[in-house]
Amino acid sequence: MQMLYDSDAFVVVHMQANAPSEGEPEPSIARHGFEIVDKRSNKEVYLDGSWAEAFQRQINAWQVNTPTQEEVEETLDGYAELAQNPLVMH
């Protein structure tokens, strides 16, 4: 797990699969995803599969052309509209 972004409005965390233990085979499909938490609404959305791949492409584009905070938050706001899950602390 790696925190990628933290602001007053959002947190973005990259969730990566654990490396296999010694002697275990590598998984045939490496699974990863992104959790986006909207602090304003206390909701979160988890992106995996094709959604995660699309978000990874967005991150790669940001690394090439550094966006403003407003541009990042505007993009995250679009993903936050998908959030249906209330944030629950364990």
Image: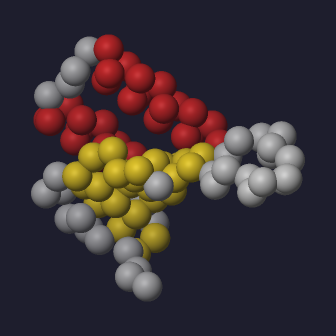
Out of 29 and 88, give the one closest to the viewer: 29
* Total numbered labels: 0
Image x and y of residue 17, in percent: 63, 52
| Colour scheme shown | secondary structure
| Residue most extreme to the bottom | 90
Q: Quadrant of residue 42?
A: bottom left
Looking at the image, residue 25 sits to the left or right of residue 40; the answer is right
Residue 3 visible in this rendered orientation of the protein: yes
Image x and y of residue 5, in percent: 27, 46
User: Where 58 falls versus 21 (above or below)?
Assistant: above
| Residue most extreme to the top | 64
Residue 80 visible in this rendered orientation of the protein: no
Looking at the image, residue 50 sits to the left or right of residue 59; the answer is right
Image x and y of residue 66, in percent: 22, 21
Q: Residue at x 38, y 82 (%)?
A: 89
Q: Quadrant of residue 52?
A: top right
- Assign the C terminus to one quadrant of the image: bottom left
Q: Quadrant of residue 40?
A: bottom left
Q: Residue at x 23, y 52 (%)?
A: 6
Q: Residue at x 63, y 37 (%)?
A: 50
Q: Residue at x 40, y 63 (%)?
A: 44
